[in-house]
Amino acid sequence: MARLPEYLRALTSLAEAGISVCSSEELAAAVNVNSAKLRKDLSYLGSYGTRGVGYDVDYLRYQIAREIGLTQDWPVAIVGIGNLGHALANYSGFGSRGFRVAALLDAAPERCEESVAGIPVRSFDDLDAVLAETPIAIGVIATPAGAAQGVADRLVAAGITSILNFAPTTLAVPAGVSVRKVDLSVELQILAYHEQRRAGAEELRGAAIAAAGEEQSA
Amino acid sequence: MARLPEYLRALTSLAEAGISVCSSEELAAAVNVNSAKLRKDLSYLGSYGTRGVGYDVDYLRYQIAREIGLTQDWPVAIVGIGNLGHALANYSGFGSRGFRVAALLDAAPERCEESVAGIPVRSFDDLDAVLAETPIAIGVIATPAGAAQGVADRLVAAGITSILNFAPTTLAVPAGVSVRKVDLSVELQILAYHEQRRAGAEELRGAAIAAAGEEQSA
DNA sequence: CGCGTTTTGTTCTCACGTTCACAAACTCCT
DNA sequence: AGGAGTTTGTGAACGTGAGAACAAAACGCG
Ligand SMILES: NC(=O)c1ccc[n+]([C@@H]2O[C@H](COP(=O)([O-])OP(=O)(O)OC[C@H]3O[C@@H](n4cnc5c(N)ncnc54)[C@H](O)[C@@H]3O)[C@@H](O)[C@H]2O)c1
Ligand SMILES: NC(=O)c1ccc[n+]([C@@H]2O[C@H](COP(=O)([O-])OP(=O)(O)OC[C@H]3O[C@@H](n4cnc5c(N)ncnc54)[C@H](O)[C@@H]3O)[C@@H](O)[C@H]2O)c1
């Protein structure tokens, strides 16, 4: 389920606030979901609550982390060290959640001379060599859209089985490879859509009020 | 619907490739969805196809853009010009899709002296003044998680009605305000989950094969 | 020890989104 | 003009996920 990471983060917040036990209602409120849905999600992992009391925050945190697979460290490779790639490489939120930037790759030779956040940028042609040094299962694509499919193909060929794609393209990958995409402009367009509908509704209200006014005056 | 932007992008690709007419099957293949679903989505906007022929790429493109609200320009304000904020401000993909970075805001005074991509960084305290100069409906939050809720509250108070949140927190906003969130670590955790399940399945297969071997040898 | 209170785990129902399947409509060819 | 072939638009079945409601279990207290 895609909600488990949200629960996990909310639980971490609670733990940091010194709270050791919480009810499904409280946790559900923190993630903006229905409490019944939350309980159903958690019961899917097993019975980790005590009736009449609630859930032990630390225990539940561990159980969710185990379910997701965060008890181990996941090395990640970032491909395309441009604007976005730099920001990702510098991002400290990775490490604190069980992910480790294990390699930075770029096709441009001049990029390969620098280091970002203490990690050297290597040539994308050395992909196989890099993966031979450290086994990496997750690849992040931060290249221009035109290069994304080619990069994905090579990552898959090199044995990567999970891809996080920031380029605005839908990637085609063989079965058995997971792809998630993060698309800024799609999100903005969805916001624009709602924004426009709000504006349209306002106009309609305005027109209705105007019409009512006319009616009254007639 | 959240799929319209995907269709739009696929159509733009087709148009750039010089294709002027396409069938629902082709377009559906380009976005990895069922063709019936695509047709139903499109029929929701109206009957913009010709039976036996397909859809006119440019015409459909315009209709979807109109439905989403991309016939107008959407000014966007970015709050928090750190690692991520810089990358966003430098991102050219905004403008080409109907969005314009209209303002950059940050709380740190030293940030406010620089310009990013030709746009001056202003103090977050000047929010109201900035919005008075240009009306902005969409705000992007790229501040640390701890500051996100406070920033969101002030954005809403200043009249922003759509928020794109990059900080790993769930924001509480009044009804009538849209929030979308982009969370890197959630995406990575979902990938890790699938990755782990794959590893688990392999182990199970291995165990089954071992068990079968034992059985045979017994 | 029993009763009331609280909160989980689960069952049931319902609504939504997805998919199949087919009729209507359009083009092209004869 | 008519028929063959294609492709849209949509009605109906299907499956999945969400929410409400309730029974089972734990705790506290008299
Ligand atoms: N910058 C942002 O804020 C932002 C936001 C959303 C989406 N994106 C998307 O992320 C991607 C990267 O954006 P960016 O602003 O960092 O672009 P960029 O041009 O700054 O960086 C792209 C990098 O990829 C490298 N590259 C190009 N082809 C490559 C290949 N075949 N193999 C390996 N590396 C290759 C380039 O050398 C460059 O360093 C784009 O697809 C963009 O649409 C960026
Ligand atoms: N860098 C990444 O690649 C990345 C990826 C995913 C998510 N994020 C998230 O995006 C957010 C920003 O990340 P970052 O790496 O750019 O952090 P950063 O520390 O580099 O930048 C944060 C910026 O926000 C400003 N700021 C702090 N409090 C503020 C306030 N109250 N009002 C206005 N501005 C304020 C700071 O001055 C700073 O410039 C974080 O929440 C992070 O978790 C970052």
Image (cartoon, coloured by chain):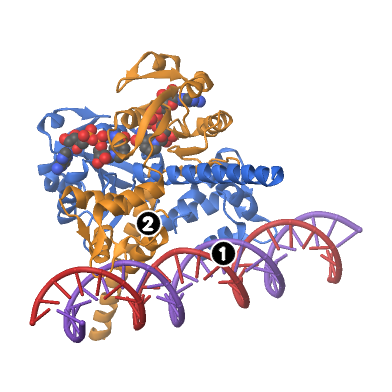
Chain colours: A blue, B orange, C red, D purple
Q: B12 or A49, which is in the foreground?
A: B12
For label 2, the residue is: B193
Is the residue under label 2 in contact with that under label 1 (CB below 8 Å)? no
In which of the image's four quarters is ligand 2 placed? top left
Q: Is residue A123 visible?
A: yes
x and y, in percent, of residue A109 in the image: 10, 32
Q: A202 or A139, which is in the foreground?
A: A202
From the viewer's perspective, tell me whether residue A129 is left or right of residue A63.
left
Q: Quadrant of the N terminus of chain A?
A: bottom left
x and y, in percent, of residue B120 in the image: 37, 18
Residue type highlighted by circle 2: Tyr
For label 1, the residue is: A47
Residue type highlighted by circle 1: Ser
Q: Secondary structure at mark 1?
A: loop
Quadrant for residue B43, please give it: bottom left
Question: Count the marks: how many?
Answer: 2
Badge 1: how crowded within 10 Å, few (<14), some, or many (20+)? few
From the viewer's perspective, tell me whether residue B6 is left or right of residue A68.
left
